[in-house]
Image: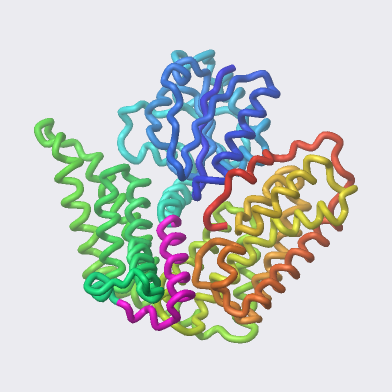
Amino acid sequence: MRFVAVTSCPTGIAHTYMAAEALEQAGRSAGHEVVVETQGAAGAAPVDPAVIAAADGAIFAADLEVRDKGRFAGLPLLQVSVKKAVADAPGVLAAAVATVESSGSAGPAGSAAGSVAQAPAGSVAGSVAGSGAAPGARAGAGARVGTRVRQWLMTGVSYMIPFVAAGGIMIALSYLIGGFRISEVRAEDLIDAFDPLSARDWAGVLFVVGSASFGFLVPVLAGFIGFAVADRPGIAPGFVGGAVAVTVGAGFLGGLVAGFLGGFTALGLARLRVPTAVRGVMPVVVIPLIATSVTAGALLVVLGRPLKALMDALTAGLNSLTGSGIVVLGIVLGAMMAADLGGPINKVAYTFATTGLATVATASGDAVELRVMAACMAAGMTPPLGMALATFARRSRFSEAERENGKAAVLLGAFFITEGAIPFAATAPLRTIPAVVLGSGLTGGLVMAFGNTLRAPHGGVVVFGLVGHWPLYLLAILVGTAVTAAAAVALKGRPPVDPAVGPASAAAAGSTGG
């Protein structure tokens, strides 16, 4: 059979390309033709329409909304998480074959809408909605409510991460070059009297630009949640609602509310039956005007105050943590970073850290939020480093392919790319996941106990110069790495004869946000 597939993950880098390669390899092994379109951080190269027209079925291995879904209209569809495609591409392909067969179609022309086949747990089987589907039909129509909400949320997070990474690293570098008083520099000062020979002025430029980048964090999150829910009509109310959330002090929670409120308001308006004469101006005038007014107005006069109170309470509770309380927080966040190796649980912990970082990045001192960021990055580095150490320490326990993946995992772990441990989890999840969760949880707790801080949201070893008490930070990572390796070796059975290890090309993929 011939299949077209689309892969995408929240960060748009590691899982996206690993899933694509896994599906292509599974197709070759099973005698099927699989053409994959990767919708990643670098954009997408759309599949040739002729290939889609000749396909028997479609596979969406996506944690985000598939762009231009209407191109696949009429094809029997299997929808799974991107992690499922990485871990069990042959199983996903077999389920896609079953979907096509149950539809009674040998091609797109005869596909039956709504056909359902036996598919992997958590997957969605059916047929792709026509190109004329209403906005929001792209949001995983037919999927479980929880799956759709997660996709909408992860879409916002995926677009937010580049702003966090760029802004956070620039602010951190500005402090490194110009000291903590660099926060006193104003844009007007640089415009009026910038000295290209002054290191302090260059640090000021980094600080001002980084702060501007951070200022977009909540609006971008809200805007692209709105986009995921309602397509383009949801962007304006989401962005403006997010900006108002920042203005009233509702922060990250306000952004979430603004994104969903703006998206669903725009979606409801888009589905109204209106006269033909009005239909042309609905998406460019009527929907943005009404949806933006409703969303921003609600945030400003109704929801802003209680959301701000909740954010203040959460911040106060976080800052009040001391001693064992903050160590437990580090253990929990560390375990979450390793629980699904770059998946939704990992992103929840990482987003918690980065949004907290955004609130204190321009302030001096030793805020708890800076310790949270340090714990999350260290815990995200530990899984690939620990699995790599295990393959070096007990080579006989691992296959040749696993040892090769171990070499790649060293580089991935050093640069805070948690997905470097996925090839090991794909073949033996019940042995790998407990080992990496144990090591990362320990690392997160140690970082909190040592009082390490970090102002950069990403970078791994590249940003060690920005870490508070970096020798202890390195010690925490080394201890977690050793514990992960010891646990992995202890849990490891005999090496498989022909292991189906995930694509080793993860080394060339990279990731953002762990």
Residue 233: percent from the left, percent from the top? 26, 45
Compared to 120, does 294 lie above or below?
below
Given residues 57 and 195, the one toward you in this image is 195
Count the marks.
0
Asked whether residue 263 appears in the rendered view, the answer is yes
Q: Quadrant of the C terminus?
A: bottom right
Compared to 85, does 252 lie above or below?
below
Compared to 269, does 441 lie above or below?
below
Residue 203: percent from the left, percent from the top? 40, 72
Residue 161: percent from the left, percent from the top? 45, 56
Residue numbers of the magenta segment? 161-185
Residue 273: percent from the left, percent from the top? 19, 36
Residue at the outermost left position: 277
Q: Residue at x 29, y 75 (%)?
A: 305
Q: Residue at x 54, y 73 (%)?
A: 466
Q: Quadrant of residue 185?
A: bottom left
- Is residue 333 found inside the magenta-colored segment of the image? no
**Display colour scheme:** rainbow
Question: Please, what is the dominant secondary structure of the magenta stretch?
Answer: helix
Q: Residue at x 68, y 65 (%)?
A: 440
Given residues 176 and 245, the one toward you in this image is 176
Asked whether residue 125 appears in the rendered view, the answer is no
Given residues 332 and 301, the one toward you in this image is 332
Q: Is residue 197 left or right of residue 430?
A: left
Q: Quadrant of residue 301?
A: bottom left
Residue at the outermost front position: 197
Q: Residue at x 54, y 41 (%)?
A: 16
Compared to 449, does 372 lie above or below?
above
Q: Is residue 203 left or right of residue 507?
A: left
Q: Quadrant of the N terminus?
A: top right
Given residues 197 and 441, the one toward you in this image is 197
